[in-house]
Amino acid sequence: MVELTYREIDIAAVERAVQSPACGGIVTFVGRVREQSRGRSVQYLEYEASILYKRGVHPKPWTYMSQPLREFWRRYVTLRGYRDGFCGLLLCLLVAYYYGFRVTVRLAQLRHQDKLNK
């Protein structure tokens, strides 16, 4: 059972859909994200990039390609995302884009802003 949606997920409906003696088990996880921290809006991309910025990481020109490839390889091959078929491939590509490319771009923007402010 696979469904991509922007709507809120009804956990009880998901559990009912797979409730069968043939199904071995189901594990669900519900995560809650804070909208605000210290009076400011929280975005994970911003948070991840700020951690790298504080560590003094400087993105190199090749990082924009190598980091997404490294992240994809880690998730698809090392963590065996291929076992989930097309959904595993899609998820690994999206996560590689987000963690590998978007965070690197945001980190470069923070570095550029820092140079302009000095």
Image (cartoon, helix red, strand yellow):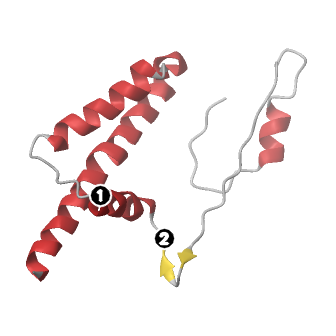
The residue positioned 31% from the left and 56% from the top of the image is 52
The residue positioned 37% from the left and 64% from the top of the image is 46
Label 2 Cα crowd, 10 Å radius (few <14 / some 14-19 / many 20+): some
From the viewer's side, name the closer residue of 9 and 56.
56
| Residue 42 against residue 82 in the figure, above or below | below
- Tell me the tag on residue 72: none
Q: Is residue 31 left or right of residue 56?
A: right
* Residue annotated with mark 2: 42
What kind of residue is marked 1? Arg
- Residue 101 placed where, x, y %? 26, 47
Q: Is residue 2 left or right of residue 88?
A: right
The residue positioned 35% from the left and 38% from the top of the image is 96
Work out which residue is located at the far right of the displayed protein and give it.
Answer: 21
Q: Quadrant of residue 14?
A: top right
What is the quadrant of the N terminus in the image? Answer: top right
Q: Is residue 45 left or right of residue 108?
A: right
| Residue 23 against residue 38 in the figure, above or below | above
What is the quadrant of the C terminus in the image? Answer: bottom left
**Secondary-structure class at tag 1:** loop
The residue positioned 29% from the left and 52% from the top of the image is 102
* Residue annotated with mark 1: 55
**Tag in front: 2 or 1:** 1
Q: Quadrant of residue 44?
A: bottom left
Label 1 Cα crowd, 10 Å radius (few <14 / some 14-19 / many 20+): few
